[in-house]
Amino acid sequence: MGERAFCSSSSSLGLVGIIIPLIVVSGLVGLTGTRTSNWVFTSNHYPWVWSSVIQSSSSNSNSAIFVGTNNTLRGSEEEGSGAHTDLNPRLVVADNHGEEDLSSNESVLNRSSSPPVVKNEESLNTSINGPRIVASMNESHTLPMRASSKRKLSKLMKLEVSLGQARAAIKEARINGNQTQDPDYVPAGPMYWNANAFQRSYLEMEKQFKVFVYEEGEHPIFHNGPCRSIYAMEGNFIYHMEVSKFRTKDPEKAHVFFLPFSVTTIVRFVYERESHNWAPLKQTVKDYVDLVGRKYPYWNRSLGADHFMLACHDWGPELSSAVPDLYKNSIRALCNANTSEGFNPAKDVSFPEILLHDGTMNHLLGGPSPSKRSVLVFFAGGVHGPIRPILLEHWENKDEDVQVHKYLPKSVSYYGMMRKSKYCICASGYEVASPRMVEALYMGCVPVLIKDHYVPPFSDVLNWKSFSVEVTVKDIPNLKKILTGISTRQYIRLNRRGLQVRRHFEVNFPPKRFDVFHMILHSVWLRRLNVHVRDFEAAS
């Protein structure tokens, strides 16, 4: 495919030729002056918020502090049950809009060098059945930014006004349930926390969302990434983003700013194998952020809160820590969405790890009907991490219905086994990300998640409980009992719903509406709706 011609190949540029020009340019622009800020970033206008996700950081002149509410999060069970399950803190509920219990307490990201924080204008208490979330929109649908009739709005204030309109439209859809007919797709069903609000949010994104991609940085580390292998989504997203209709060349029109480096290529070209030294990798990230922060005003005005990075490599979270503001404030789109390692679902995005052997979904989609699946549950994978040894200890070669293997015989097809199975186990290794979740959805096998501290992909929109099974580590000995306890009718529901949401995990060339590329963008869009960047000079 022509689109894949952009993807990373086996080219190898010298490390010196990659890094030194970046450091030199960074140093030159650094001469323009010290980092100061006349801006305050506030996350007062939340269309939704999650429980136990407002994080605090130590206070110093170069750091930011989140101060916010700690709201209880609950999620609805299967339709008609009326029961609720505590999803805190693992599950993100963003565009779920089931609705909310709004606290009037404000969340503020401030810096000591900034002017006094402007108080939150208004907040609204509402509540309906569904997940408990938080909104912060004016009940009368007035916009979140007020300026006197004599004062001209700055470009940033105009952007914030448009975001306020989007919040109001999403709230309207959430409350009144109105939905727009769409020739491509109209979301519906219990797979969505709130299908009406998701559709309205998606349409608002299509109507106005703009992303500025920094042009600084050269191949192979920047504007480049793998489009094959287990980290394929890094390259796929970078290349599609750079030619997307959502990209703007005018940073004044951008809602968010993309840092176009690939952690996988940084590891490949900068890391010295067996050195266990991450310092050069982190320095590469720091140099790049310093460069754009000194050359442009946008990073410093929000301390990176309207910027985002994307990484599928396991080391993505660690490399982001090279820049404290990137780690604490920026939107980090990560496959390794582990809350125990700092993943913050209030601002970070979980997206799926997808193994693309040839860069496409060829031979991955499709499978037999539920009635033709003879194996109850299947897993095959190497022994690493704390969960898989327990799984193998209890079930390897113990039961014909529970096909758990360390390695499959060469004569047995891995994908063939997935297509024969009703349920497919997706167990954490050393990290929580796994391509098995998407492979299961591709092939019509119901995912069984055995993961601690994991935020499933797009769970700001998708209710994973409606199309997957979650099993705790302590319940691994009861795995067969749990799965056989699911009725045939309910299993068919899980299977059918998985096939319905599969479109959100598909990789298309070029991207199609509602596919994985657009779902990643939508999750970034949601996080941008959660923040409010204030121009104090314009508002004073």
Image (cartoon, rainbow, N blue to C red):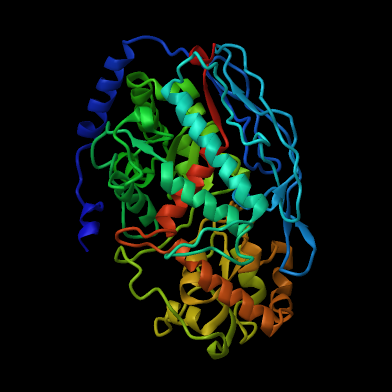
Residue in the foreground of this view, choosing between 248 and 297: 248
Q: Is residue 305 visible?
A: no
Q: Position of residue 199 (x, y in %)?
A: 53, 55
Q: Is residue 199 left or right of residue 131?
A: left
Point 62% across, 45% down: residue: 171
Residue in the foreground of this view, choosing between 388 and 125: 125
Q: Residue most toward the front? A: 149
Q: 460 above or below 212?
A: below
Q: Position of residue 501 (x, y in %)?
A: 52, 66
Point 37% across, 60% down: residue: 512
Q: Quadrant of the C terminus?
A: top right
Q: 318 above or below 481?
A: above
Q: Quadrant of the N terminus?
A: bottom left
**Quadrant assignment, res 78:** bottom right
Q: Is residue 193 visible?
A: yes
Tally of marks = 0
Q: Is residue 37 left or right of residue 397?
A: left
Q: Is residue 244 left or right of residue 201?
A: left
**Quadrant assignment, res 30:** top left
Q: Position of residue 419 (x, y in %)?
A: 48, 81
Point 42% across, 53% down: residue: 518
Residue in the foreground of this view, choosing between 99 and 483: 99
Q: 466 above or below 102?
A: below
Point 60% across, 40% down: residue: 346
Q: Position of residue 539 (x, y in %)?
A: 53, 15
